[in-house]
Image: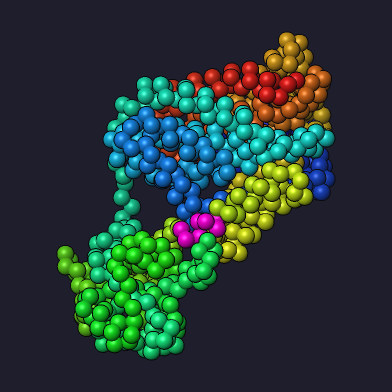
């Protein structure tokens, strides 16, 4: 027992200090338990095969699909527009929208998604963003309490109850608790944020030095000279390659992209493919996006029997024509003094032949050269706007002695949302929830999550398996899997019984309500210093043993652990969402104490009184 307590104490010290990565601390603690033979290798590695850990991996991928398709951004943006210019309405909508999204996807991802939307909406409403950003972070944690998958502590206590022989908590078992958390949050945060968070000046957006894709489109006027032509099935260009059309020399036109839609009869499931390579073979119903003079576009369409589409409606949606960057993108390239292409024309440089990219324009000091680009001679200091596949653009970075690619092409590509797949992501999400909610469907929760994760990859909502792996927060997974055996060690060596005996003997005599309060506020205090996941893993067996020794139901005690572990607001470093808004809201540590500490205490008092009513002793 003593060795286990020492390992636990040393681990907590390192968790609190923050000088060593938390996942490394967890792995070292696991190794110590194995070295001292407190756990067998099978017991020590059991966390890595635990269904809850596997479920967390799947949930990261599902959340990645929701973010990458822009589904969450689309929903949140439309809801927040309902606020108009009313600051109070905006405040309420921020909390409710964030809580709703946080119920299904990670809290950190929810805040990262909502932060720029909320800042822009605050600017439109003339509101102070600092009044909204801290409530935004808190709301993401409160929303996580509404469903089984909302936050890791929920999964931990559900697994602990099932392991002890009790019924596993269902998907919406947490909903009443989560709704009460959100209600308390709204009531408490509205006056506190108004009193303590409105004096701070609006933060200035720091420039990263990298222009967004839309900024580049506007700067070079690509949308002004954008035209679309559809290729009929009987056109003479069907079967020809894009390069063989030689549009730049014959008509002075650039093909920005070829857009090809599959399954056009099935609007919900249709996919969009973009092509820009010169060897792309043209097919009937392809839509060419062209830039250049309108009269030349019309001449090209007449010569090849193509259909010049109405400028005001796209091929399927009826929206205004616009450039999308799903598969192909744009970037700026700065020519160095040593560039071999200096004093050569764009045609002679052979960007298309060598790198599969197209030069759309040249910025020379304050002048933009956009027409007859092929015959323009390039000079030192010119900035070329190039277009092509994202990987092809990234390849340009290898030619360091000739030019510099401004910005990060692959990072920009990762920001592009596959919005045409948003309905598919929504359908997959609904399917996962249905499989988890209805008991008559013989599918385990972990299986439902894995099905959804695989479907996200197979339907392209996540950019392949590599993209799926990138959505997973491996630090959280390793931390979780490595610390789970610590709970087993605490039970196996009797530490949990010893701590629970101490709690029961000291405050159990005052009744189960007092013991519940002790469990709740002990967990709440621990979460201020170490990860809520670790806190839940350590406190769950203690809460279970305490309830069983007192002879009452462990369910309210387990809920006390998960709520207390998640409702930590008094420090900017207690949860990742709190830390995310620290600089954006220009907050100080004391701002969290003034606003978060009262909320944390009030939330604790309310939960201690409400939990026994929802889940009787």
Residue 189 visible in image: yes
- The image position of residue 395, as x and y in percent, is 42, 73
- Height in image: 588 above or below 113? above
- Height in image: 66 above or below 92? below
Left or right, residue 275 beside residue 546: left
User: What segment carries the magenta color?
Assistant: 418-425
Name which residue lies at 63% across and 42% down: 149
Residue 423: within the magenta? Answer: yes
- The image position of residue 329, as x and y in percent, is 39, 67
- The image position of residue 82, as x and y in percent, is 38, 39
Residue 187: within the magenta? Answer: no
Where, quadrant-wise, is the C terminus in this rendering?
A: top right
Q: Dominant secondary structure of the magenta stretch? A: helix
Name which residue lies at 82% across and 49% down: 42
Q: How many marks?
A: 0
Residue 35 visible in image: no
- Height in image: 515 above or below 417? above
Q: Nearer the viewer, residue 527 or 327?
A: 327
Q: Nearer the viewer, residue 566 or 251?
A: 251
């Amino acid at each position: 027992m003593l060795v286990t307590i020492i390992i636990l104490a040393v681990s907590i010290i390192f968790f609190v200090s923050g000088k060593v990565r938390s996942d490394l601390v967890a792995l070292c603690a696991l190794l110590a338990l194995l070295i001292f033979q407190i756990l067998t290798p099978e017991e020590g590695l059991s966390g890595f095969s635990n269904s809850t850990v596997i479920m967390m991996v799947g949930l990261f991928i599902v959340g990645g699909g929701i973010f990458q398709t822009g589904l969450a951004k689309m929903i949140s943006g439309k809801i927040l527009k309902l606020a108009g210019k009313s600051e109070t309405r905006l405040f309420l909508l921020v909390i409710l929208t964030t809580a709703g999204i946080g119920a299904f996807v990670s809290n950190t991802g929810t805040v990262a998604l909502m932060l720029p939307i909320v800042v822009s909406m605050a600017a439109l409403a003339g509101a102070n963003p600092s009044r909204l950003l801290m409530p935004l972070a808190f709301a993401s944690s409160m929303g996580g309490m509404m469903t089984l998958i909302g936050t890791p502590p929920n999964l931990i206590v559900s697994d602990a109850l099932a392991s002890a022989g009790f019924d596993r908590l269902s998907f919406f078992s947490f909903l009443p608790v989560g709704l009460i958390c959100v209600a308390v949050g709204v009531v408490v945060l509205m006056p506190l944020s108004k009193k303590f968070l409105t004096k701070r000046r609006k933060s200035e957006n720091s420039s990263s030095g990298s222009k967004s894709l839309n900024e580049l489109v506007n700067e070079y006027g690509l949308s002004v000279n954008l035209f679309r032509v559809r290729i009929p099935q009987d056109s003479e260009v069907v079967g020809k390659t894009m390069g063989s059309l030689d549009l730049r020399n014959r008509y002075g036109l650039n093909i920005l992209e070829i857009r090809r839609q599959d399954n056009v009869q099935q609007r919900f499931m249709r996919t969009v493919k973009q092509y820009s390579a010169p060897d792309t073979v043209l097919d009937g119903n392809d839509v060419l996006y062209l830039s250049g003079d309108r009269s030349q576009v019309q001449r090209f369409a007449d010569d090849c029997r193509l259909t010049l589409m109405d400028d005001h409606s796209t091929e399927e949606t009826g929206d205004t024509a616009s450039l999308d960057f799903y598969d192909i993108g744009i970037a700026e390239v700065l020519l160095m003094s040593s560039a071999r292409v200096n004093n050569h024309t764009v045609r002679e440089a052979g960007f298309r032949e060598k790198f599969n990219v197209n030069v759309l324009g040249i910025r020379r000091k304050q002048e933009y050269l956009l027409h007859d680009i092929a015959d323009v001679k390039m000079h030192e200091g010119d900035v070329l706007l190039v277009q092509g596949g994202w990987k092809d653009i990234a390849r340009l970075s290898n030619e360091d002695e000739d030019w510099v690619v401004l910005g990060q092409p692959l990072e920009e590509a990762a920001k592009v949302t596959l919005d045409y797949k948003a309905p598919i992501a929504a359908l997959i999400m609904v399917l996962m929830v249905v499989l988890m909610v209805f008991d008559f469907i013989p599918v385990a929760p972990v299986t439902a999550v894995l099905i959804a994760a695989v479907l996200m990859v197979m339907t392209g909502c996540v950019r392949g398996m590599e993209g799926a792996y990138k959505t997973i927060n491996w630090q959280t997974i390793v931390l979780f899997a490595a610390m789970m055996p610590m709970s087993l060690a605490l039970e196996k060596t009797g530490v949990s019984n010893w701590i629970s005996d101490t709690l029961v003997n000291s405050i159990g005599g005052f009744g189960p309500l007092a013991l519940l309060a002790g469990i709740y506020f002990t967990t709440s205090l621990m979460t201020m210093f170490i990860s809520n996941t670790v806190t839940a893993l350590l406190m769950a067996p203690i809460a279970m043993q305490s309830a069983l020794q007192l002879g009452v139901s462990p369910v309210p005690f387990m809920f006390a652990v998960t709520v207390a572990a998640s409702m930590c607001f008094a420090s900017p470093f207690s949860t990742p969402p709190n830390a995310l808004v620290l600089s954006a809201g220009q907050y100080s540590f004391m701002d969290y104490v003034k606003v978060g500490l009262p909320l944390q205490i009030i939330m604790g008092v309310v939960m201690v009184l409400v939990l026994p009513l929802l889940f009787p002793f």
